[in-house]
Image: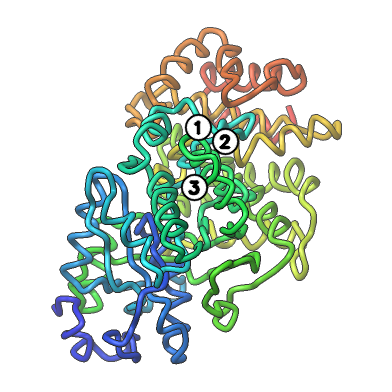
């Protein structure tokens, strides 16, 4: 077993791709906040492949985090010179590649001083983020900035020692403005439609709370490109560690991923950018169209099946797709209730995209857990599922399947499966959701009265009545019976 490090790269077994460029010659150009699995399998990989061509050697990544739990991730990466083993999982076999585009990781500190100083360095021209869909301090219904959140209140009152990533960005930009070193691009890599616009709203709104002139400067000079990111990347656990060891590599934080990636980016970078399009990314003026197709079909498709699977006791997404009723549920909801509201993008109709997602979800080599996919439903349902419900109601189109999806989320949040086993907390608002779900067991309507998620959908009888019916059936007859009834058209 070879411990992963710069020194051990020449010793890795044959067949494992590894950096051919001199990592000692790399210079930083990007700070990335949220050094999790997705970033290392996606943005870091695209940059690594550019470096393999002798390009972008001054765009290396410095990792960062703003929470105490990021410390453990940092320590693991520091111990292996910030290298990551990527393991592509395909039904035909696995392959491994060591990625070397990350060259540092900012120390975690209260007040985020080291992170602010790193981002203020003139070498840094892009600050990118993967902080999860629910991490942007936006109201899930109105999409407005949540200025009342305790983290935001803290950062507005303490702009030099912020708690959030966005507060740190504002503080770094203040230093750059005052020092005359110019702006940087702030780039979201999260699954949010209009992620760049949402990120701009968060950063500028936060700055305005403490320094209106700085907010105006950021809004005028920084860029916030929209993008669509796509790659299924499971969490790392014992199985993933064992896969790396099977290649002869002792990697404390390997990443497994499907053999598919997509990155569509708005070409709006105020301080330059790597030529990611030379290694498969796409720069496009129609990012919104690609985002909408992916979020409405892939991300919402995950929510279509995840709560159902959790209540039925299934553990992986591929296992879920192998269940005939759940697979049929995914196909029927996608074809009848989602794709009529999705505008085609060049080279891929919505129906073709459903087929693609079907095959990707069903890939048995990807051990993607139902629990991971079901996590943070309080941001994923409002952002990924409910916009299609609203489209369907406006168009007089079917919404019964989507009402079932929402009832399944309520049923899951009640905290038990159909077999009586407990479901562990799996949402930032789990206690509140569980309490409301308990009330909805007796009377379904309180669930839809959570207007912070559903807005006025409780007042839409065609959706609300179907929701009531499905949740009642789920408790009386079980989840599978409810799904079968929908499939039978009853």
- Say which element carries label 2: helix
Dot label at residue 378: 1
Q: Quadrant of residue 87?
A: bottom left
Tell me how far mark 1 sits from mark 3, CA to CA. Answer: 22 Å
Where does the image place residue 94, in percent across and percent down from the top left?
A: 38, 75
Q: Earlier in the sequence, mark 3 or mark 2?
A: 3
Q: Which quadrant is the N terminus positioned in?
A: bottom left
Q: Nearer the viewer, mark 3 or mark 2?
A: 2
Q: Residue sitting at 21 percent across and 76 percent down?
A: 249
Which of the pair 66/80 is nearer the observer? 66
Circle 1 packing at 10 Å, graded few (<14), some (14-19), many (20+), is many
Q: Are marks 3 and 2 in contact (CB under 8 Å)?
A: no
Task: Determine the CA span between mark 3 and mark 2.
Answer: 19 Å
- Residue at x-position 60% and y-position 51%: 219
Note whether residue 358 is visible: no
Q: Residue 479 at what x, y percent from top left?
A: 53, 29
Asked if the residues shown at circle 1 and circle 2 are in contact, with their CB atoms under 8 angstroms apart, the answer is yes
Which residue occupies the foreground of this view, 211 or 270?
211
Is residue 446 visible in this depiction of the protein?
A: yes
Residue 320 — which label? 3
Q: Is residue 15 above or below residue 397?
A: below
Residue placed at 69% from the left, 46% from the top? 334
What is the C-alpha distance between the residues marked 1 and 2?
6 Å
Residue 175 image-quadrant placement: bottom left
Locate residue 105, reporting x and y percent: 27, 63
Q: Which residue has dot 2 on it?
A: 381
Question: Does residue 52 lie above or below 399 as drawn?
Answer: below
């Amino acid at each position: 077993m070879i411990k992963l490090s710069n020194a051990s790269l020449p010793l890795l077994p044959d067949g494992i791709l590894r950096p051919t460029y001199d990592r000692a010659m790399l210079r930083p150009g990007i700070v990335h906040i949220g050094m999790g699995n997705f970033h290392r399998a996606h943005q870091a990989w695209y940059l690594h492949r550019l470096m393999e061509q002798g390009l972008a050697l001054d765009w290396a990544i410095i990792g960062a985090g703003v929470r105490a739990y990021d410390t453990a991730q940092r320590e693991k990466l520091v111990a292996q010179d910030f290298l990551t083993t990527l393991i592509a999982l395909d039904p035909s076999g696995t392959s491994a590649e060591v990625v070397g585009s990350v060259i540092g990781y900012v120390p975690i500190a209260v007040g985020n001083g080291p992170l602010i100083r790193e981002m203020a360095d003139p070498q840094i021209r892009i600050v990118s983020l993967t902080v999860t869909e629910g991490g942007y301090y936006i109201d899930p219904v109105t999409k407005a900035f949540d200025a009342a959140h305790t983290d935001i209140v803290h950062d507005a009152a303490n702009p030099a020692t912020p708690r959030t990533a966005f507060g740190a960005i504002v503080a770094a930009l203040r230093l750059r403005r005052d020092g005359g070193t110019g702006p940087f691009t702030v780039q979201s890599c999260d699954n949010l439609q209009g992620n760049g616009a949402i990120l701009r709203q968060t950063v500028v709104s936060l700055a305005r709370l403490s320094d209106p002139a700085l907010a105006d400067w950021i809004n005028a000079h920084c860029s916030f490109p929209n993008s669509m990111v796509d790659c299924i990347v499971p969490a790392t656990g014992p199985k993933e560690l064992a896969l790396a060891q099977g290649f002869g590599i002792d990697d404390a934080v390997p990443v497994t991923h499907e053999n598919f990636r997509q990155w569509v980016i708005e070409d709006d970078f105020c301080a330059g950018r790597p030529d990611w399009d030379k290694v498969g990314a796409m720069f496009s003026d129609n990012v919104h169209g690609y985002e909408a197709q992916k979020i409405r079909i892939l991300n919402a498709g995950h929510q279509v099946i995840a709560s159902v699977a959790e209540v039925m006791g299934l553990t992986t997404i591929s296992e879920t797709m192998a269940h005939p009723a759940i697979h049929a549920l995914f196909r029927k909801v996608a074809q009848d209730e989602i794709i009529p509201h999705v505008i085609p993008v060049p080279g891929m109709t919505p129906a073709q995209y459903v087929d693609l997602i079907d095959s990707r979800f069903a890939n048995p080599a990807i051990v993607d857990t139902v629990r991971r996919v079901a996590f943070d439903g309080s941001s994923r349902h409002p952002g990924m599922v409910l916009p299609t419900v609203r489209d369907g109601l406006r168009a007089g189109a079917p919404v019964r399947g989507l009402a079932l999806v929402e009832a399944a989320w309520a049923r899951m949040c009640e905290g038990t499966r159909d077999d009586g086993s407990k479901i562990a907390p799996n949402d930032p608002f789990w206690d509140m959701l569980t309490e409301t779900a308990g009330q909805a067991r007796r009377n379904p309507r309180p669930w839809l009265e959570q207007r912070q998620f559903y807005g006025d959908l409780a007042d839409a009888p065609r959706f609300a009545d179907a929701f009531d019916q499905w949740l009642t059936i789920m408790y009386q007859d079980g989840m599978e019976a409810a799904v079968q009834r929908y499939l039978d058209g009853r």
